[in-house]
Image (cartoon, coloured by chain):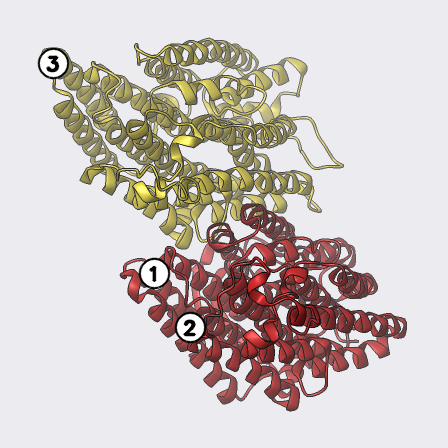
Chain colours: A red, B yellow
Amino acid sequence: MIAWTIYITFAGALLLLFLPRALARWLALLTVLAGFAVGLSEFFNATNFATFKTVVRLPWVPMLGMEYHLAADGISLTMVLVTGLTAVSAVLFSWDVEERPNEFFFWLLLVVGGSYGVFLSADLFLLFVFYELVIVPKYFLIAIWGSTNKEYGAMKLSLYSFFGGALAFLGIVAVYVTAGTAKNAAAALDLQQLAQFSFPLPFQAWAFPVLFLGFAVLAGIWPLHTWAPTGHVAAPTAGSMLLAGIVMKLGAYGALRVAMNLLPEGFHMWSKWIAVLGVIGIVYAAAVALRQRDLKFVIGYSSVSHMGFVLLGLATANALGVGGAILQMFSHGVIAALLFAVAGRMIYRRTHTRDLDTLSTMGLGHALPFATFCFVVASAASMGIPGFSGFAAEIIILIGAWKAYPVAVWITGAGMVLVAAFTIRALKKTFFSDAASTVPAHDAGVPFETARISLAEKCGAGLLIFATLAVGLYPKLLLDRILPAVEAMRFLK
Amino acid sequence: MTNYFELLRFAAPEVVVVVTALVVLALGLAKERTSGICSAVAAAGLLFASAAVLMLPPQATLFHGMLVITHLTSLFQIICLALAFFTVILARGDGSSRHHGEYLALLLLATIGLMLLVGSEELLMIFIGLELTGLSLYVMAGFDKSDVRSAEAGLKYFLFGSTASAFTLFGLSLIYGMCGTTGLAAIGARLVVIPMQPLLFLGIVMTVIGFAFKIAAAPFHLWAPDAYQGAPVPSAAFIASGSKVASFVVLGKIVLVGFAPAQGSAAWHAMIAGWAPVLAVLAALSILLGNFVALAQSNVRRLLAYSAVAHAGYTLLGLIAGGREGFTATLFYTTIYAFTLVGAFGVVALVRRDTGGDDLVHFSGLRSRSPLLAGCMAIFMLSLAGLPPLAGFFGKFYLFSAAMRAGNDHGLLWLVALALFGSLISFYYYLIVLKVIFLDGESDSSAPRLAMKLDFLQKISMAVLAGMVLVLGLLPASLVARISASLP
């Protein structure tokens, strides 16, 4: 049943190419809603979360052992859920795309479908096929429909993605060749069987960093994170939402499911360094965000900072930390999507500027009350105010990290103050500036139309706010599904 | 044991193509304005020849291996015929030549050369095949008498080609002198017995150099950019596809069957003299040089030429790995590469006919002029870049895993890592082509471009090629299994 998320999405994408443009957004909405519904029903109805349970299994290239093999456990179900959630709100926030809408939604649905595929693949080759499938659609989404410096941002993002992909490719080929001979190749690509295989230690020592880094590029690991802010800023609103909400999770998921799960000893050898990079990412990105003038850059760097938490959580190698990392992946997906939606769609499309100083003269707090409300909620969640999902996830990660790296927790604690600082700064400058009272909006010299917030925007924002609140107030909902799956992984210390 | 009737039976496909070539030549000479009929006859002849290949007995050897029929030869003869078929379609109505009949006859003669190359396991016959192909292709490259670039292409291709032929012939003669036989299997058996010596290595290296020229591997690639860019588009397409496929088949047979005992090893810390390290150096040079130089190109055909150099490097990886798996990977990759490139050249030909050039600027805004061509070009470029779900991705995975598996302890890791680095670079310039097609020329609505006029045959042939690249990427199992099963 859950496999239908993939089929529905790709079918919708293909159908879009042949439909009149007036129907494009409706078909896209219908497609992502159907995918979301399937993901949601599986999320609540599935009973077995601990094992990677096979959904479909068909031979694909028998000679080389490739199978079309989909499976799901608690982690996959959670990731599928956040994919559906982000996809629905991304389509709602691109309701106003008038330029080549069929193509726009075609590429968008390819990203979504590929992501579903990655989260559900139980075959190493299949996982990588879906993983690489996402690169080119991202390029076109940004390069055609983006804004500021779009071609540069799109190319940078694509090259970084491809670079990560090439590293992961190398690691995957090495794993494939080491685990099986030409005769029993099937076992060498099956993720469940590979997870039982003990790779020689010297092999793990070099293959793990290659694989992990390859995937982690997409998760925004410092110092290979620079594609993320540039790409997020250049992307159209839906593009930023997908990038932050889904694509960065692909990297973290790949790092967890492939690198860590298959090469546990290699992971233990390197986990300290992952933690170091994660902590640097948290603090560094937060510090950089504090100095940005462009609202989207602030959010872009906050994404890198939040993904640093994911890496730190993964590096702890205990169930709590890793479980928290997955919860953070969900939480950040929702929160970042909401932040980008407010910045890109609600503000930028109306004011045509994202410069914080200019925005501070506009008195947006009064002009766009709904946008203000959404941004306040998202900022609170992003800062880690209790009651929102961000708090639940980060506190769990820190508890996990306390066991493994107490020093990291101290540094991160200081970093969180920076997170709060840049978030409040952005919030104040954008909506609650004193300057607004002295200079009326129409004198600011910027064309500024207070078009009303549309129904589509309200629905999309409402969905995301509901998700962050629901998980924040009742994290057990997700943790009950995530933790059994994490505890079944063999790299736990 | 063999009479002429039997020979005629076993060589039926070649005979069909020869007859077709003569008929087309006569038709072309008989009257002006017969290009349509010539194309139709040539296409029909190629189809008949494919049918004849299918009707051959599954296994036969004539004249000590001068003409061999196995599953492998049949499969690749059909592939060569198919490539020639698409080239005929590409050449249809090409305004550049008034002598269409002659052009097609040359194309068919080159095809016979390819079929002989594929279908022989004997050095002498292989050389004849090489020469027949080469001589036809030299003329085809310089066929456009109104274009000085075409003459340049023809001359360069001829000069480099004849030098390389001399190398090959010299090398082959040395090997014959050492082994006393020209049959590949017999040479392989002899090489096990006789000790390795400098003269023998000289022969092997010279032979390899001759083929390195044919497959455009660096540093023997210098003819390729000019030939690809200057020659008439169908000629360039055929040089880049058919000639390359057949050369890889023969090179594979020669090194893996004939020179098998002299393989040596290209593993990083355990290099052993032999042809494998030679090929490894060629591959590494091709990958680096091809990709880096392609970055700087502004002409799509020249870009494809340099990328072809890089792809020759990737494809060599399979041969360096050796064994059935490596050879299968090489053959699979070169096959899908050939079809991708014929498709890409097809798009270039149509764009050239529409805009009068094939620089990157001529492709700008192709999306709005012809969504179909733009989509097909996207598929070809992304497949060359090695992105899923297209055939190029699977081909690369197969090649690299075969190379990784060869040798102990991931000895060829360095080559695989280099090849992946090369693909990263190539991704950039392929994406630039797509950027020009899909992004540029959109904003300036002041000059609305007319939709390109394409007839049904052009549309369907492009769509078929793009579809092949997609289907071979999604379902490569049947072709891989077929190639693998056909290897001895």
Q: Residues within 10 Å of mark 1 (few under 14, many from 20)?
A: few
Q: What is the CA distance from the residue labelled 3 to the residue labelled 2?
A: 60 Å
Q: What is the CA distance from the residue labelled 2 to the residue labelled 1?
A: 14 Å
Of B231 and B204, nearer the camera is: B231
Among numbered discs 2 and 1, the one appearing first in the sequence? 1
Q: Is residue B69 above or below residue A357?
A: above
Residue B43's image quarter?
top left
Q: Do badges 2 and 1 share one subunit?
A: yes
Instruction: Please tell me whether mark 3 or mark 2 is closer to you in this view.
Output: 2
Disc 2: host chain = A
Find disc 3 in the rendering and name its residue. B32
Amino acid at pointer 1: Leu
Q: Is residue A103 above or below residue B94?
A: below
Find disc 2 in the rendering and name its residue. A32
Camera sees residue B488: no
For the N terminus of chain B, which image quadrant? Answer: top left
User: Secondary structure under badge 1?
Assistant: helix
Query: Which numbered tag is attached to residue A14?
Result: 1
Percent across and percent down for residue B260 are 56, 30
Residue at 16% of width from left, 19% of height from top? B24
Camera sees residue A211: yes
Amino acid at pointer 2: Val
Residue at 45% of width from left, 36% of height from top? B334
Q: Residues within 10 Å of mark 3 (few under 14, many from 20)?
A: few
Of B371 and B336, nearer the camera is: B371
Q: What is the CA distance from the residue labelled 1 to the residue labelled 3?
A: 47 Å
Q: Do badges 1 and 3 share one subunit?
A: no
Q: Is residue B187 left or right of residue A393?
A: left
Disc 1: host chain = A
